[in-house]
Image (tube, coloured by chain):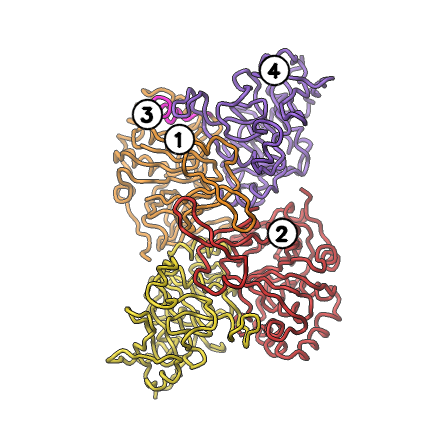
Chain colours: A red, B yellow, C orange, D purple
């Protein structure tokens, strides 16, 4: 297997993220790859299918910036704060473009990634039963246990063209390490055709660390060193979550004008560093 | 009345519903506040599980999100998100699922998806399901904490995100849902519980300072009340002090 | 949930392991609960259905001692050495009693435990296809993906009455911690009705440790402190594998007489200490 | 001949088959010895995965079992057994599966289950499947290392534990097996490879000191040999020295 190579963020995004692609930027509150998301906005990508359990501010920004045609998700709020206004504006008023949505439960999304990582076409769970979620997508179906006859729920594997995550560290060989809440990132990387990992830093070797998850270099495509690349999310051991940013986002994103001002000031006119 | 708010009463009543030693799958917001209050008052051995994969989290301050660093740092175990749903929630080993709601109906079905009659053109787009459908399905019992209002308490939810009792008795069994469903809905006015025969939510306790008329006015179906209707014990000084320490500088 | 309680090994085995029960003693080369297995022999349990990926010496001993009516397994050899002679004698010559077997692949067994841990009646995998394993059990069946129509393999969940494992540490509250190769033990405990964990020691609290798996006290039934309880397997951080014992077992177990002598000298007449 | 044994030649030939940088799922015994030899000679970046869940193990001595402590201590990552099979082996991301065999047939099917015609009453009960069926199914290609003898090399295995080419061309595709199957069988006498048209194993290299007649006598089907038949390069001093260091005090 070819091993991961290092690249600048803008080069890696240009290489891996194409118009119309299915892209998953994962990170469950912790380690959200904001810098990579902003680079996707800067490069003007369009018609993306974005996949993510919790769209969070990062997808609110990508949606508002007009990059997204379709969203596959399970919880689209501003955690602890309220609505994602750009997401709502797109769903409710089709601004800046109509947004097709496919929504699931967390359990369903997690299992869809896990099936992708496991090379299976579908996953089985006890889920969705009796909910109205089932009526709005063909991606939730019944499946019968061949031993007991019990009917359970099946969801198809997720296989993103590219998964993007942020991790704390890479070593020089391109192995990647993260710790703390690591969510569904291992599955999202293993399920994808290709992957981009932004990291806080390159270390000579990984010191022993409790709770660490290592992705060997042969399952990662590109690594870009982007210190603070998860901001305003956080990287345990490097930074803390900027809860004030999440609170402030409510006002910034509520109106299209203030959002566009923010976009111009903090994303579009900024270099990729 | 005493110097506490109806929101404080709600959170304290919700906290009291949690038994010491119970294992509780906690949604963010009101449920998390109540669960953390319980752990600091009468239920020090309450086990908190957050859907970020933190099992046995013991936060020393209220997390703003389910993925705050303090949850991982204080947890007995941090597992992946697929694992927390598959190995820990799904098999029915969690005692209590603790949920919020945007809309709730007379059969305790929960809507956190959208308001309106057309899914494709919602009047209000809500965040969506998150972990709630499977929490509501799989936990041994479910508590819901939600402010009571005519907007939130409707006869039939616009969208069933998480199943309570469906259309009434027998629906959970027919759907193969293994948990008992919502056993208690704690609001800022009182407590509602399902009638054992009809599964309809009935007012079973009124917080001090609230009236049945207030509760009826804040409910979108003809609300029945248990008779005689007990009054919730008011917050103790200790409960209030701990709650206020916990929420210092927090929205809720 | 009731939390784990501490007990003496003989009491815990007497309480949890009954004649005719389905019992899984797990541990993948590392952390094999030999002491608990020997206690089961001493207590004279009969008609057990034993479940284990790699029967190893521990099940060779239980089989030779006449405790076992049925074996569910995936690899029954002496690792790096050769045959399990007591297992072979039972299968080939029905000594000391006929042994019914149900055999799987490792992938199948691992998925069966995982399904049990997940509360699902079955697991889906790409496995067994084209092999003669399929013909010899009704516990391998096809299942069709409801999205792609692809046919995959289903195996039913394992749900042992009791799972027994050995771990390095428990804390005073009865939480259990193991590290190193942890195999399928988490799944085996979570899949079982009840569980017994033998541990090297009780510690006041768990110091941070890379690669550790914690089982919270509310998923464990009983804990018995048995230092060296994995011998001749090992407990990383406490002991090393006694490879000479595994080599010597080949000669000890080859003849019924030498096995019976060993059993009398090293198991039956020894207290559970 | 030179001072090396046919077993040493076998292990060295097997090691040479592994490309540097390949990801290799390693069975214990002969395959593990060969894979570790390769990592210490021409393939320092060979990635070794053992079914105990150790990914990227770099043992400084030969493990006796697949669960030896040295594998976990030197691995890039130690994962659970379900994970190593589901996330790492099953999706087809492993380049080479490296297996042993008790019986092997002309279509490279592998038997590690039992010898005899009646499963219920085996003449010899072997250990069983272990990880082999899915290693043989899912790796991009498979190498088998096994001593050649009339007992081991049979026309048709008594029990198909792991599928090679089934009954011949097209069988793997019909079964939905995604890896290419056994590309090379390395023995103490030479190397066999499947004929691209018939899938039958054909002698494609003879180790120095062995003869075609010997190979034929040790094979339970009419063995065909490639013409002209190359001779395996003999072990270099370096290969021999490293192998002997590695196996010092070990059975194989």
Comparing labels 3 and 4, the label whose residue is closer to the camera = 4
Q: Residue B243, located in which quarter of the rendered image?
A: bottom left
The magenta span reads: C82-93
The numbered dot on residue C57 is: 1
Q: Secondary structure at mark 4?
A: loop
Dot 1: chain letter: C
Helix, strand or loop for the magenta stretch, by majority:
helix
The numbered dot on residue D222 is: 4
The numbered dot on residue A192 is: 2
The numbered dot on residue C262 is: 3
Comparing labels 4 and 2, the label whose residue is closer to the camera = 4
Seen from the viewer's position, the closer of residues C246 and D66 is D66
Q: Secondary structure at mark 2?
A: loop
Comparing labels 4 and 1, the label whose residue is closer to the camera = 4
Dot 2: chain letter: A
Residue B144 is inside the magenta segment: no
Q: CA distance from mark 4 to mark 1?
A: 40 Å
């Amino acid at each position: 297997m070819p091993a991961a190579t290092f690249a600048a963020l803008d080069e890696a995004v240009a290489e891996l993220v194409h118009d119309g692609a299915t892209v998953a930027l994962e990170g469950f509150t912790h380690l959200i790859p904001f810098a990579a998301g902003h680079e996707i906005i800067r490069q003007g990508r369009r018609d993306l299918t974005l996949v993510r359990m919790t769209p969070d501010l990062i997808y609110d920004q990508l949606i508002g910036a007009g990059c997204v045609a379709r969203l596959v998700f399970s919880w689209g709020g501003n955690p602890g704060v309220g609505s994602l206004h750009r997401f709502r504006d797109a769903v409710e008023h089709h601004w800046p473009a109509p947004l097709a949505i496919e929504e699931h439960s967390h359990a369903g999304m997690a299992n869809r990634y896990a099936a992708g990582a496991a090379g299976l076409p579908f996953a089985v769970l006890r889920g969705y039963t009796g909910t109205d979620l089932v009526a709005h997508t063909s991606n939730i179906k019944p499946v019968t246990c061949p031993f007991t006859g019990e009917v359970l729920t099946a969801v198809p594997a997720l296989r993103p063209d590219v998964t993007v995550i942020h991790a704390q560290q890479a070593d020089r060989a391109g192995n990647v390490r993260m710790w703390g809440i690591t969510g569904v990132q291992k599955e999202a990387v293993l399920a994808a055709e290709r992957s981009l990992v932004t990291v806080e830093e390159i270390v000579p070797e990984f010191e022993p660390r409790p709770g660490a998850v290592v992705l060997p270099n042969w399952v990662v495509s590109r690594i870009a060193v982007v210190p603070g690349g998860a901001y305003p999310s956080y990287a345990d051991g490097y930074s803390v979550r900027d809860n004030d940013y999440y609170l402030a986002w409510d006002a910034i994103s509520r109106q299209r004008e203030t959002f566009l001002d923010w976009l111009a000031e903090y994303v579009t006119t900024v270099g990729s560093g | 009345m005493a110097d506490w708010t109806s929101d404080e009463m709600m959170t304290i009543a919700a906290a009291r519903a949690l038994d010491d030693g119970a294992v509780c799958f906690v949604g963010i917001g009101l449920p998390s506040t109540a669960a953390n209050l319980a752990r600091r008052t009468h239920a020090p051995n309450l086990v908190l599980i957050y859907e970020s994969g933190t099992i046995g989290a013991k936060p020393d301050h209220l997390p703003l999100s389910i993925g705050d660093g303090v949850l991982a740092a204080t947890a007995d175990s941090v597992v992946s998100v697929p694992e927390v749903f598959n190995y820990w929630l799904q098999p029915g080993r969690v005692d209590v699922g603790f949920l919020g709601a945007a809309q709730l109906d007379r059969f305790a079905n929960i809507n956190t998806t959208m308001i309106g009659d057309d899914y494709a053109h919602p009047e209000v787009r809500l965040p969506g399901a998150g972990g709630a459908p499977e929490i509501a399905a799989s936990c041994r019992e479910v508590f819901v904490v939600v402010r009571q209002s005519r907007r939130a308490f409707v006869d039939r939810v616009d969208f069933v995100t998480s199943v309570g009792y469906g259309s009434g008795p027998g629906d959970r069994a027919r759907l193969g849902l293994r948990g008992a469903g919502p056993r208690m809905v704690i609001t800022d006015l009182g407590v509602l519980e399902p009638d054992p025969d009809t599964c309809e939510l009935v007012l079973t306790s009124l917080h001090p300072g609230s009236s049945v008329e207030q509760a009826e006015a804040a409910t979108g179906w003809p609300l029945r009340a248990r008779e005689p209707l007990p009054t919730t014990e008011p917050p103790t000084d200790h409960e209030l002090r701990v709650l206020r320490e916990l929420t210092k500088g927090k929205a809720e």
